[in-house]
Amino acid sequence: MIAPSSGLDSNRMDTVWLSTAYFGPTHYFDLIKKAEVVWVEACENYQKQSYRNRCRILSANGPITLSIPIKKGRSPGQLIRDVRIDYHENWQKLHFKSVESAYRHSPYYEFIIDDLVTFWTKRWEFLFDYNMAITELVAAMLKVGCSIRPTESFRAPGDYGPGDFRYRIHPKLNEEGTDYSSVPYHQVFSDRFGFVEGLSVLDALFNLNL
């Protein structure tokens, strides 16, 4: 299992609403594991500096952020589902090399990397579609049986009630340690940095027998 988190509801929930995420953090998938139905927000405006196009991994030099470049020229009201990925630079190769360098000595790297490498070789046009493919595969790897669906309209933050986590999972909250606290597990560079919070689910996949 992914190490459980405190600060989030530990009870199983019928429905959860989440933002889209690029290899979202472990607590993002904790919520998916607890839900019967997961709605991923497709109708919001694009949010900068969030997990929508970035994730954090633990390298030999400490935590690093991997960011997906987004095409310029978006209209102010462009929906997240219409945001296109920019391939002007080969960011996929850079991300894969970073992941390989960080986790090639982890216990389960060689067992699962072949299932993940397509996300750094195949091109998706839209960020939302790319993230959905990632989330669905990771959920399958975690043996999660919930239904994961895109939303069809937008509602304001909090309108969905206690299951609405669309704007409660954010890198800034993690850095400040205000939103959750994970049960520690062994990480590749634990001897250097201790246990590091707020990392991508990739960290758990490579280090734990899920």
Image: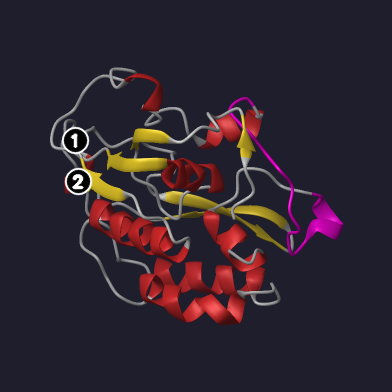
Q: Residue at x 55, y 48 (%)?
A: 26
Q: Nearer the viewer, residue 22 or 37?
A: 37
Q: Is residue 57 above or below residue 34?
A: below
Q: Are marks 2 and 1 in contact (CB under 8 Å)?
A: yes
Q: In the rendering, at what x and y percent does residue 200 appear?
A: 54, 53
Q: Is residue 40 magenta?
A: no
Q: Is residue 143 left or right of residue 101?
A: left
Q: Which residues are magenta?
A: 178-194
The quarter holding residue 107 reads bottom right
Secondary structure state at the residue bearing disc 2: helix
Q: Nearer the viewer, residue 70 or 142?
A: 142
Q: Residue furthest right?
A: 191
Q: Quadrant of the C terminus?
A: bottom right
| Amino acid identity at mark 1 | Cys
Q: Is residue 159 visible?
A: yes
| Amino acid identity at mark 2 | Arg
Q: Quadrant of the N terminus?
A: bottom right
Badge 1: residue crowd in 10 Å (few <14, some 14–19, many ≥20): some
Badge 2: residue crowd in 10 Å (few <14, some 14–19, many ≥20): some
Q: Which mark is residue 138?
A: none
Which secondary structure class fits the magenta region best? loop
Q: Nearer the viewer, residue 112 or 120?
A: 112
Q: Is residue 50 left or right of residue 98?
A: left
Residue at label 2? 81
